[in-house]
Each structure stands twice: as C-alpha cells, then as structure tokens.
Amino acid sequence: MRVRFDFRSPGAWIAAAFAASFACTRPVSPDVQAVAPTASASIAPSASAAPATRPTEVAASEEPPAPAAAPQPATAPLGWPENKEMAGLYATMGMMGASWFPGYLARLAKNGMNAVVIDAKSYDGWITYPSSIPLAVENRAGSHATVKSLAAVVRTAHAAGVRVLLRVSCFHDPWMAGRRPDLAIRGMKGWLDPNNAAAQDYLLAIVDETLPWGVDEIQLDYVRYPTEWITHADFALGTKKTTDVIAGFVKRVHERTQAAGVPLSIDIFGVVAWQRSVDVLRTGQDLMRLGQLVEAVSPMVYPSHFSQGFNGYADPGEHPEVVAFGTRQAYEVLRRSGSHAIVRPWIQAFSWHAPGYDTSYVVREIAQARSAQGTGWLAWNAGGYYSEVMSAAWASKAKTPALN
C-alpha cells in the first residue's frame, strides 16, 4: 500500500495532541478504571485521585512545601525480557501516589502487560518524588511530589512482574523555565534551552539520581525543540544545528545509562519517522543519528494525528493500520543507519478523531505494530482511561510472544 506524505507537520501534530489531551479528560465508558506520552499530563482514574484536568502553574504564594528528600535504597532492576518485548501504558503522577496503584499494577500484569511508564519529571516540570538535586530544591520543583519514595514504587511494580520505564519530560518545563529564565529559551515561555549546558546538567542530574533505584529503562520525552509559538524565540544556536544539540544531549544521557546497564529510549513524533528535512531540523530529532545512541525508539503513531488524505484515507483516525506505517518507517530508518535499536510504538488509547474506537480498535493497533517490526507497544490516554486497552491486551495475550 503506497503511503502519501500528507501527514501533519510538527506544529499540527502538537495541536492535535493538545486537542486529544483535552478530549481524553472524560471517560470513554462508565466502567473505565485505569492510565497512559507525550503531550500533557493525565490524571488517576479514581474519584479520590487527582483532578480531571491538569492544574495550571501554582502561584509562588500558593506553592506547597517541597517534601524533604530522604535516602532511598538502591534497587536492582528486573531489566528487559530476553526477547525485549514490553507492552504497557503510562501512569500519571496521581496514579503513582494512589493507594490503589499496587493493585492496578497487578491488574495490568494479569491482563498480559509487563511494563508501566511513570514520570520522574512531568510535562509541567514537576519532580514526582522528593529530590536532593540543588536546582530542584532551590526552585521547589518537587513541591508537587506524589510519592515519598520512587524506589518503593519501583519495588512494588517489580513485585507484580512489571518493568518500570522512567520518563523524563526534558525540555518542556514551564516550572523551571519560569523560575530560571537564564536556563530557558529566550522569547517564548515554557521551554528550557536544549543548548544550555546548565539546563542539560539539570536533566542529567535527574537521570543520575534515579538510576540507582532499580528502573528498567530511562525514557526521554520532549527531547526536541519546540515547534509551536516560536515566532519570537531565540534558539541561540550559533553555528550549531538543532540536530547537533539534541544528539549531543542524548549522547550525554546514554553515557550515564550505558554505564549503569540500563537501556535508554526516546519518544519521537510520528512524522519524524519519515525524516523529512523540515521535520528533522524543526524538532532536532534525526533518527539516523539518534538511533546510534539509544536502545529503543517510540514513535507516537496515533492514527488520529495524521492529516486527512494520509494514504488516501478521508479520516485516518478510522484506520488502526496507520500504526504500521510509522512503526515500519522508523524501523527501516534505524536499520539503514546501522542501529540495532528496537521500535516500540506509542499507540492510540483514546477516541478523539477515531470513530469506532473500542477494544477491537486497540487489538488491531497491537497487531499492526507487531506486523511492522514493532517490538512491544505502549498505550497513551491523557485522561488515564484504559478499559479498552486492558481488554485488548487480554485478547492479544495468546498472539503475543511470552512477556516475562
């Protein structure tokens, strides 16, 4: 089947992601109880959990005190399964700290999944645990921490047979950018400057602090340049290219993770898999280079985020097979580059612009990912509603290589 290149630009991709995020703050069915990268934080699916919409930045006078950091014991990771197959979903800050989370992890495993993505630093720039990093302490980045011990969360997941993929939302950081403008991109709000050494060092400190706590993978999200609202932005690149900066940063992270024996993964826009120069330079995400520096790549191949006309489809959101296009494209680019990184796509777990979204839709997405050389999958729903994913994972168990 021939693919037409009418997919969304990075800017349009962002707009679609935000629209989907707000659409997903409502449950898609009354019995949904559950979680999921990349555009916004989500909430815990419980009446006693976090609010249904992501709170706006708290005024300085209203900031809650940051919890005191206490030493957290080192924990051994479970590591990737031998076949590298991991299937899972994203758990929000609210979910991590909920009393029912251990039971939720057990349910996740019972339904055939073996991985959960949790935040070390969220899209808002909040550190989810009590941190000892000086910059985080000085600027109260941990004032919204939802867990007393990240190591304890990891141990709980491991006890259920679930691997922990620790997500770091890198350069999108309204909290720190607003408090330390010297670390931020000039001329716009909400983003740390990827080319700022001190900003990079802050992210590296988060990786260094969390690696001893048994995490099974470090996952970098928002490891790119902004593509929206950049009219007045000054990237201060000098003679560098955006791709030089992003690859240089990922290399620094990989040196840490490799030394610790922990795999590194990156989240990328679905359109980046096609490596068009305009998309590569705007985001700074050059797969031909980044594939050499990571163990896994997760393209966000949500069908609803592709433009009308993609592959001749009037409404790509009606076609779960769109997952296969971006997955296969990323796989082929990585192999051409000589990289052995696996492709583990993010699949759509929400009904926004996806007519007929249900359990069978997710089952088909999972099958399409596998048919396109994907190694496992991750599901994303910005509202944290996963009944369809739970059912689809169970239905796909018999067809999935053993997840151990």
Image (cartoon, grey):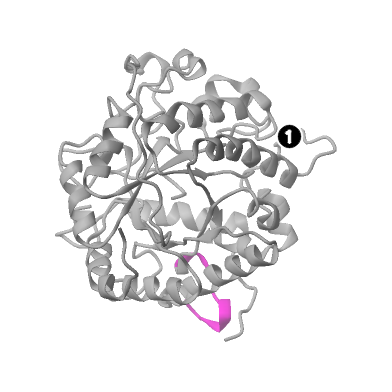
Residue 87 coordinates in the image, percent (x, y): 35, 59
Whether residue 212 appears in magenta in the rendering, the answer is no
In front here: 379 or 382?
379
Q: Quadrant of residue 309?
A: bottom right
In front here: 164 or 268?
164
In the picture as drawn, the residue positioned furthest to the front comes out as 82
Residue 121 coordinates in the image, percent (x, y): 44, 33
Above or below 303: residue 292: above
Above or below 363: residue 262: above
Give the residue drawn at x 47%, y 62%. 345
Above or below 64: residue 214: below
Magenta segment, which residues? 304-315
Q: Quadrant of residue 276?
A: bottom right
Q: Quadrant of residue 182?
A: top right
Q: Which residue is mark 1?
A: 234
Whether residue 312 appears in magenta in the rendering, the answer is yes
Q: Amino acid at mark 1?
A: Asp
Residue 155 coordinates in the image, percent (x, y): 27, 37
Left-right relation of 156 to 199: left
Give the residue drawn at x 30%, y 58%. 404
Left-right relation of 305 to 255: left
In the picture as drawn, the residue positioned furthest to the right comes out as 239
